[in-house]
């Protein structure tokens, strides 16, 4: 089963949704990493083999986070992020074929589409 790390900008309903579905979820807030820089967050995800869920577009930079160098990154991309909007985007991802292909990949979820880049 997939293991997840939710970044500090991920709304609580997403964390709860994953837990309700039986996934192993670690939240940045609960781990004491809230406010930490991106390298600390991705380092934890790598060490524990967790897929990072974030609204931070910096994590979509393939030069900084090359495909295959992590367990997977899901970027929820909105112009003006809201908790409700990000949660809706995550539902779009969960209902897409990208869920089965997320391991070691970069998934960008935007309104109406899910893009996946695999190693």
Image (cartoon, rainbow, N blue to C red):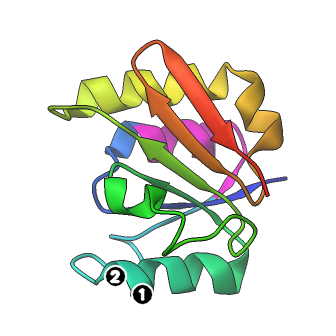
* Residue 74 point in image, percent of width and height: 54, 48
User: Which class describes the residues within 10 Å of circle 1: few (<14), some (14-19), or many (20+)?
Assistant: few
Residue at the outermost top position:
112
Q: Residue at x 45, y 39 (%)?
A: 14
* Residue 17 point in image, percent of width and height: 53, 36
Quadrant assignment for the C terminus: bottom right
Q: Is residue 16 magenta?
A: yes
- Say the numbered circle drawn on residue 69: none
Front in this rendered view, residue 5 or 22: 5
* Residue 2 point in image, percent of width and height: 77, 54
Front in this rendered view, residue 21 or 35: 35
Residue matched to label 1: 40
| 36 left or right, relative to 103 | left
Q: Residue at x 60, y 31 (%)?
A: 115
Q: Is residue 28 above or below residue 108?
A: below
Q: Residue at x 61, y 38 (%)?
A: 20
Q: Is residue 46 magenta?
A: no
Q: Which residues are magenta?
A: 14-24
User: Which class describes the residues within 10 Å of circle 2: few (<14), some (14-19), or many (20+)?
Assistant: some
Q: How many marks?
A: 2
- Cβ atoms at labels 2 and 1 below 8 Å apart: yes
Q: Quadrant of residue 56?
A: bottom left
Q: Residue at x 67, y 87 (%)?
A: 47
Mark 1 element type: helix
Residue at the outermost front position:
63
Mark 2 element type: loop
Residue matched to label 2: 33
């Amino acid at each position: 089963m997939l293991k997840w790390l939710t970044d500090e900008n991920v709304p609580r309903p997403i964390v709860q949704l994953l837990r309700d579905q039986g996934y192993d979820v670690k939240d940045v807030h609960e781990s004491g990493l809230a406010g930490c820089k991106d390298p600390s967050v991705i380092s934890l995800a790598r060490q524990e083999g967790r897929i990072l869920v974030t609204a931070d577009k910096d994590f979509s930079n393939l030069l900084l986070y090359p495909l295959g160098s992590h367990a997977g990154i899901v970027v929820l991309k909105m112009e003006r992020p809201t908790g409700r909007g990000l949660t809706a985007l995550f539902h779009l991802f969960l209902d897409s074929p990208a869920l089965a292909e997320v391991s070691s990949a970069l998934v960008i979820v935007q309104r109406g589409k899910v893009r996946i880049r695999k190693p």
